[in-house]
Image (cartoon, helix red, strand yellow):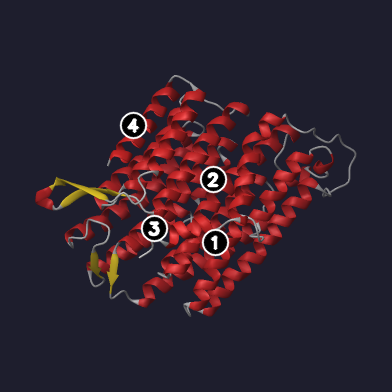
Amino acid sequence: MIWFVASMMAAFSAIVTSIYNKLRATVILIILSTLLGILGYKGGSYCYYWLKQLGLPMCIAVDGASVLLVLLSGIVSAAALVAARMLNEEREQLGLAITSIHFTMIGLAYAYSLPLFYIFWELMLLASSFLVYLWDKRIAIQFFIYMHAGSLLLLVAIGILASEKATIFGSSVLVTGYGLVAFSLILVAFAIKLGVFPFHTWLPRTYTSLPGSSAAVISGIVTSAGAYGLYRLLYGIKWLNLPQSVAFTGFWLGATSAIVGALAALLARRLGFIASYSSISHGGFMYAGLVSLSRLAATGALYIMFAHGIVKPLFFLLASILAKQAGSDDIRDMGLYAKTMPLTAFIGFVTALSLAGAPVFAFFPGEITVIIALAEAALNPIAVAILVTALFLAAAYALRYWLRVFWRPVVMVPRRLPSEPPRRLLLVPLTLAIIAIVAGVLPAPIFSLLGAMLP
């Protein structure tokens, strides 16, 4: 309880300093709130009965997945604020929106009862809708409708679980009748949140309507939180007598999304759309791993959540820098940039290999764990083969992006190549690239963190 209050107070202070446009103080407070939030790990649990007559408690606790979410939120929030200043992508109240999202992430990570979880979930959706609204009012309305459609389904599911006296994570629910309805609603609600096919149409529109720093927050924190929420609802509740057909349906949904997103990314011509469609593909991987209800697959899916939260902001920030230097984010207008932008090319190389799921880069440990776990679980071999195919397609679109932008152009025409941007502009993407490499080279600490908390 002490760490929770201290972390929330530091995050709230960051909101206050952001209103006064104090970047340095805001970043320091975000880092402080993240460290305080992590210190609550394995600190037991605390419950307060908000409406005792209805059996609605407010409980907090922290496990390994919570630590990972808090850490991810702190890294991306601080990086986005610094990048927005350096790339001239600031807007009035931008800091307020980003710090508010970070504040809700800490609450979401600590929430260990359904009422408290839903409160912070709804606050997160409002804060993220506000962030989108700052840049595009029309897209913000669409984003709000999609997100709150999923939120309404989640609210109905929580109401059903409350009627079954399952309001604290760790409770048991018999999956018959209304219990089956609740489980199905949860699958649909988080499919919308993760942008899983066919509920994905909001995602590319939203991502490409935002500048790189804001897209980094929506993709790296808000969308990744969908995987955390799905984990918390599926593994925090003990679903008794669950029909295999329900989990198989969700598994197929994830596998389909993985390959559809990869194909769309392979055909995309703008960097923003390549990043967006690859998010749909990786969202499918996370979804398939979690709904399989395999402990090992869930561990891999949460690892992908962390990798996604680092690599997608890296990609969007890199795309923003390339667009500023070259005047376009269309890969048909690019080529040979490695000659004049060597450091940018290195960051692009790390981004490409991470997206491709190459060994020793961020996505590889999680993706290979999901594939092995699903194969061992003897689930539908065709769906597993689809996921493997999606990995090869990821390598194809990552290689295409890397070659078209930094090496051979589509059409050889005389033109002046853009120069390397100032080193300060590359500081944030380079930091994220280093984290992506470390996450791939040293996966053991994260796996140890996740393995200790799964049921």
In screen coordinates, is 409 left or right of 92?
right
Question: Spatial distance from mark 3 to mark 2, Cα to Cα?
Answer: 23 Å
Residue 146 in the image: state x and y as whole percent.
41, 48
Disc number lying in front (4 or 2): 4
Question: Spatial distance from mark 2 to mark 1, Cα to Cα?
Answer: 27 Å
According to the image, label 3 marks what residue?
230
Against 73, residue 199 (above or below) is: below
* Depth check, front residue: 23 or 158: 23
In screen coordinates, is 339 left or right of 282?
right
Question: Spatial distance from mark 4 to mark 1, Cα to Cα?
Answer: 33 Å
* Depth check, front residue: 1 or 146: 1
> Dots 3 and 2: beta carbons under 8 Å?
no
* Disc with the residue nearer the chain's start (3 vs 1): 3
> Dots 4 and 2: beta carbons under 8 Å?
no
Question: Spatial distance from mark 3 to mark 1, Cα to Cα?
Answer: 17 Å
Question: Spatial distance from mark 4 to mark 2, Cα to Cα?
Answer: 34 Å
